[in-house]
Amino acid sequence: MADLKAAFDKAMADSKNLSERPDNATLLKIYALYKQGSQGDNTDKKPGFGDMVARAKWDAWNSLKGTSQDDAMQQYIDLIADLS
C-alpha cells in the first residue's frame, strides 16, 4: 500500500510536467481517477447546469463510484505513465 501511495504521489507530480496538454476527455479522466484515488466515492452535491466545468468534473468522478481507491490509484498511475 505504501508503494502504491508513493507511486500515486509521483504520478501526481509527473502529471504537471507532461510534454503536451491532454485533450479535455483525458483531462476529465485524470481528474476523476485522482479524486477517486485520493478521496474515494463522490459524496459532493451535484453542481447546477450553470457551471458546466464543475458539472463535467462531478459527472466524471461520479462515474467511478464503487471503484476502490487502490484501483483508481493504479489506473491514474498507468494513465500518467502512458501520457509521459
Image (tube, rainbow, N blue to C red):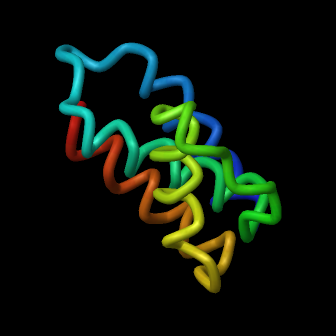
Identity of the residue furthest to the bottom in this view: 66
What residue is drawn where x is 54% and y is 24%? 13
x then y, percent, for residue 28:
39, 44
Is 6 above or below relative to 33?
above
x then y, percent, for residue 37:
65, 59
Q: Nearer the viewer, residue 3 or 23?
A: 23
Position of the N terminus by quadrant: bottom right
Image quarter of residue 67? bottom right
Q: Is residue 63 left or right of residue 82?
A: right
What residue is drawn where x is 23% and y is 19%? 21
x then y, percent, for residue 4:
64, 60
Position of the C terminus by quadrant: top left
Q: Is residue 29 left or right of residue 6?
A: left
Is 22 above or below relative to 42?
above
Q: Is residue 52 left or right of residue 19?
A: right
Is 47 above or below relative to 15?
below
What residue is drawn where x is 47% and y is 57%? 60
Q: Nearer the viewer, residue 8 or 21?
A: 21
What residue is drawn where x is 49% and y is 37%? 11
Q: Nearer the viewer, residue 49 or 5?
A: 49
Image quarter of residue 55? top right
Tag count in the figure? 0
x then y, percent, for residue 77:
44, 51
